[in-house]
């Protein structure tokens, strides 16, 4: 059962909310029996001028999963994941955009101690005729992987990037988009995550030794 509401008392203010109540009568991933849960979101937007936008979001979700004890699976445990964020954007059409975000979250499973985390990111985009430069500097701190933070990143056309920020570290990227000709456009993107407390990242065949993980991407589009 899902219901949502949007209320805009003026051009400067807008409020959104939803409530979601769900039930699964059969097994699913990490759940060996029927389970249920609920979630809600509150979103408030303030835009005093066209080039300034400020919004805040509070979101929480409760659901059940297996609660494995020393003797094997026991009755389901209720997990709660809550997130709150505030985002400020300052832009000039066809010139630049600056965006600052602060977000934090908490995860708790059953009676265990909660896991907390937060992330602070600063984004900038500059437009120079045929050239667009985009970048980010981010700082994150989480108690463990359960309290990881997700922040959407700009990427090349048809690509999607929303990495998980966990443990202690920094994240930054730089992307260039350039129109070589009227029919040819290229993207070049470099991103890196540095961890202050890890000596390896990933697992299995994806494991990398060291405290940083880097990504490089190049894309060309020809329109005809």
Image (tube, rainbow, N blue to C red):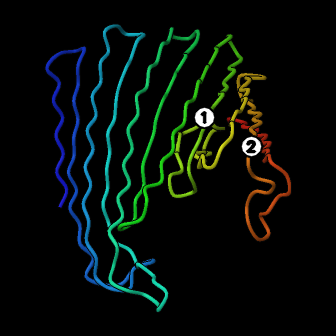
Category of crowding for the residue at label 1, using alpha-carbon neighbours closer than 10 angstroms: few (below 14), some (14–19), many (at least 20): some
Which numbered disc flags the more N-terminal residue, 1 or 2?
1
Say which residue label 1 marks: 154
Residue 182 occupies which quadrant of the picture? top right
The answer, for residue 160, to whether it is visible in the render is no
Instruction: Residue 35: give x, y in percent of width and height.
Output: 28, 76
In the picture provided, is 54 more to the left or to the right than 152? left
In the picture provided, is 187 more to the left or to the right than 168? right
| Residue depicted at 46% across the width and 18% down the height | 89
Indicate which label's residue lies in the foreground, 1 or 2.
2
Say which residue label 2 marks: 196
Quarter of the N terminus within the rendering: bottom left
| SS under mark 1 | loop
| SS under mark 2 | loop
Category of crowding for the residue at label 2, using alpha-carbon neighbours closer than 10 angstroms: few (below 14), some (14–19), many (at least 20): few
Instruction: Residue 204: give x, y in percent of width and height.
Output: 76, 71
In the picture provided, is 106 more to the left or to the right than 191? left
- In the picture, the disc for residue 143 is none
């Amino acid at each position: 059962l899902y219901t949502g509401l949007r209320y805009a008392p003026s051009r400067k203010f807008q409020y959104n909310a939803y409530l979601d109540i769900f039930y699964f009568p059969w097994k699913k991933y990490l759940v060996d029996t029927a389970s249920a849960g609920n979630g809600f979101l509150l979103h408030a937007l303030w835009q005093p001028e066209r080039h300034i936008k400020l919004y805040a979001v509070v979101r929480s979700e409760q659901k059940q999963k297996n609660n494995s004890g020393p003797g094997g699976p026991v009755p389901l445990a209720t997990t709660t994941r809550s997130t709150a964020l505030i985002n400020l954007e300052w832009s000039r059409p066809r010139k630049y955009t600056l965006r600052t975000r602060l977000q934090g979250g908490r995860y708790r499973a059953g009676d265990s101690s909660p896991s907390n985390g937060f992330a602070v990111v600063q984004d900038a985009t500059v437009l120079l005729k045929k050239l667009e430069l985009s970048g980010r500097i981010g700082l994150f701190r989480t108690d463990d992987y359960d309290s990881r933070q997700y922040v959407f990143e700009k990427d090349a056309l048809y690509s999607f990037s929303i990495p998980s920020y966990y443990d202690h570290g920094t994240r930054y990227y730089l992307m260039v988009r350039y129109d070589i000709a009227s029919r040819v456009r290229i993207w070049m993107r470099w991103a890196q995550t540095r961890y202050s407390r890890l000596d390896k990242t990933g697992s299995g065949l994806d494991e990398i030794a060291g405290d940083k993980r880097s990504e490089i991407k190049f894309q060309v589009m020809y329109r005809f």
